[in-house]
Amino acid sequence: MARTTRKARSAPKAVTPIEVLRGLTASARKAGLSASKAITNSFENTRRIALDKAAEARVAAIAGAEGARARTLGAVTELEKIFEQRVSRAMARLGVPTSRDVRALSRQVAQLQASVERLKRSRARA
């Protein structure tokens, strides 16, 4: 049997992506480009949808916060009224005069002062 000599195999040559694209047919290149465009468009559409949803969520959150603020203000106003009523009842029980009572007394004092001044003038003439 005759021996055949084998050739030593060389390491495969590294192929760059550009060489791969050059080796592709025109239709394969178009398919690659259209796939790339489709992925880019899909990404942009997804991004746009996500931004729209985020804007909707923001508007909903602001509306919810406004509603909560209005309810809180209503509750605080109601609590203030109740507090004022209870304090005024307690002050009345203690005999503390109200602002209306103080105004009435001030008016009476002013009238009495005027009367005293008239009496002084009339006595000074006499």
Image (spheres, helix red, strand yellow):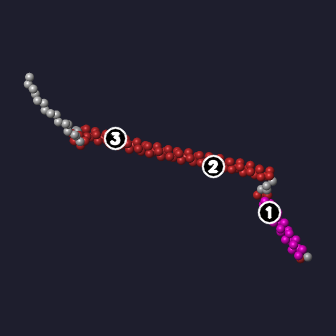
* Residue 31: quarter of image: top left
Q: Amino acid at mark 3?
A: Ala
**Could you say which is closer to the camera, residue 122 or residue 99?**
99
Residue marked by disc 2: 73
Residue marked by disc 1: 106
Residue marked by disc 3: 38
Q: Which residues are magenta?
A: 102-124
Question: Which SS class for mark 3?
Answer: helix
Question: Which SS class for mark 1?
Answer: helix
* Residue 27: quarter of image: top left
Image quarter in which the C terminus is found: bottom right
* Placement of 95 over or under 1, stated as above or below: below
Q: Main secondary structure of the magenta part?
A: helix
* Number of the label disc, if any, that sits on residue 32: none
Q: Amino acid at mark 1?
A: Ser
Residue plotted at (53% across, 45% down): 61
